[in-house]
Image: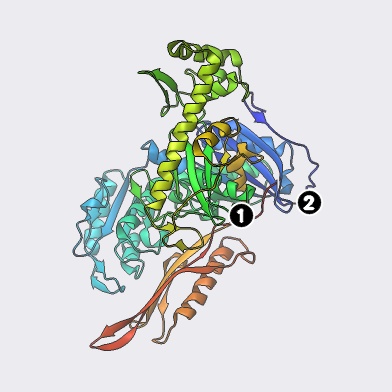
Amino acid sequence: MGENRQSLSRKTGVSPAVNRLYVGIDVGGTHTDGVAVDIDAGRIVHKVKVPTTPDLGECSMAALEDILETVSAESVGRVLLSTTLATNAVATGLLEPAGLIILPGPGMNPSFLTSTPDRHAAGGAVDHRGREIAPIDEEEIIRICESLSFKGISVVAVAGKFAGRNPTQELKVGELAERYFDHVSLGHRLSGALNFPRRVATAFLAASLWRRQKGFIEAISESVRKRGITAPLFLLRADGGAGLASMVDNAAQTALSGPAASIMGALAMNGHEEETITLDVGGTTTDISLILRGAPLLEPHGATIGEYKTQIRSLFNRSVAIGGDSEVIFASGKLLIGPMRRGPAASYGGPVPTPTDAMVLLGRAAGDETLAENALRPIAREMEVTTETCAMRILEETGKEIAEAVRDFVSEVNRRPVYTIYELLEGHKVNPKRALLVGGPGRALAPYLEARLKVPVHVPPHYDVANAIGAAVAGVTFEVNAAADTARGVLSIPEAGIYRKISRGYTIGEMETECENALRQLAEDSGIKLEAFTPEAVERESFNIIEDYQRAGSIHRLRVQVRPSILCKVE
């Protein structure tokens, strides 16, 4: 066991034959948490925290090894990782340079779509009903590919406007590009929803992250197998759903999975019949989210990852740069908490005082009290108070800043339509009656937050590993977007690769059945049984096509999903 590892294991005598222990591992900015959950009993069998290292695979496997000291590899039925790989790559600018070939069609200036210098707009266009209105020029595409390849670019994204309705041109460009590049991301395969700029950004991110994601999955899979685990490896998506690692070819889907893990963990530990603010206080940031009627909120149009507005479905949350390891300074007569994190808390050998040091000094967290006092003494001297009073003021200020961020968050939610994973709550105004606090510093900060938020603040058992719990119990999710044009006699379900002819009398009811079958097929292809999940239509519209003053047919549009869920409540 590593020197800094905080092993929290409990020997429980789990039978190797159970095979129903689901392992969840969440890689945070400061710590990597791991749990093994008995999925039938809703009971945590083992939990562990290890320091996060620059090599995310290394700390993930350190957490797994600790778990395997208590449970057998044969008893593990699933391993799910929530990783910051994609988020870190975007935040630190470590995206692989990718080429971008777009087919914008007439009437659009493509310059606003991305800032990449390797963007090329090519001829070719499909209209909103999927009809080709301008052919692609294959020689032009080849010249673009040669130019990108000459610059040393090895991955490329291709996105055509309305390609979800008819992907023929995207597929042809992809076929030509495959001769030049290691990987080609096609926009219509990543999302069937409309919104061309977001699809361009999604395809570009998918291409830029592909190699990093591929290497990570291969390395993790090999490490897991070496430890004797034959159970499937999953990754957590931004919408809180589990996806088989080998099937997650769009790494951008795993961005923001940390906040999603936090929300799913909160759901697993509490019923949330009331409107509940969830707060996950980590070492570097605090994630704020909201649960309405037992369901988390969704970003209505897709996740924003760094500067990229994507079509990645994600849960709605906001992060503020304040946490247990935030730097504390005293300037112009004021205590300032964050936004910088210079390292671990001083009481753990770090360089600057932090809220964690205040907790340690007051006996509300483990750590070296002498180091904490030494770090806080200069600030206390400037404030002309004792170090104990200084520590209390730091925690009060931390609670005040987080509470102000919560109020801003609620205000933002109330300025926009509210979507949960179940429904659109039209006209609903949010007024949280309670807060759920998780994360390592949670218990120590609870009284300060309660005083500021003016609502009860609950700290559940296992609050310190809530994200890993969320990863362990997250259910699988799938979604398809279908469009049918009965006048043209065509149906498209891009996520399932379905493009076929239909009759003029094709109904939206038939399309719903076909979408549900497509979801089940996607699940089977992923090696997952969907008996316990019920696909449901979450958006539908149908209207007539009028041509020459007569009804020529109908347009049906439908979005069907297996919504994010938890597999069990956790004690």
Question: Which residue position is annotated with label 1?
Answer: 566
Q: Residue at x 38, y 57 (%)?
A: 301
Q: Is residue 178 left or right of residue 386?
A: left
Q: Is residue 468 above or below residue 176?
A: above
**Residue 347 image-quadrant placement:** top right
Q: Which mark is residue 101?
A: none
Question: Which residue position is annotated with label 2?
Answer: 17
CA–CA distance in space, label 2 to label 1: 23 Å
- In the rendered view of the protein, which quadrant contains the N terminus? top right
Amino acid under label 2? Ala
Q: Is residue 179 left or right of residue 288?
A: left
Q: Position of residue 29 (x, y in %)?
A: 50, 34
Q: Residue at x 59, y 30 (%)?
A: 444
Q: Position of residue 180 (x, y in %)?
A: 33, 53
Amino acid under label 1? Ile
* Viewer-nearest residue: 375 or 18: 375
Residue 179 at least partly seen: no
* Viewer-nearest residue: 143 or 66: 66
Residue at disc 1, secondary structure? loop
Q: Is residue 1 above or below residue 174?
A: above
Q: Nearer the viewer, mark 2 or mark 1?
A: 1
Q: Residue at x 37, y 41 (%)?
A: 95
Residue 162 at least partly seen: yes
Q: Is residue 366 left or right of residue 96?
A: right
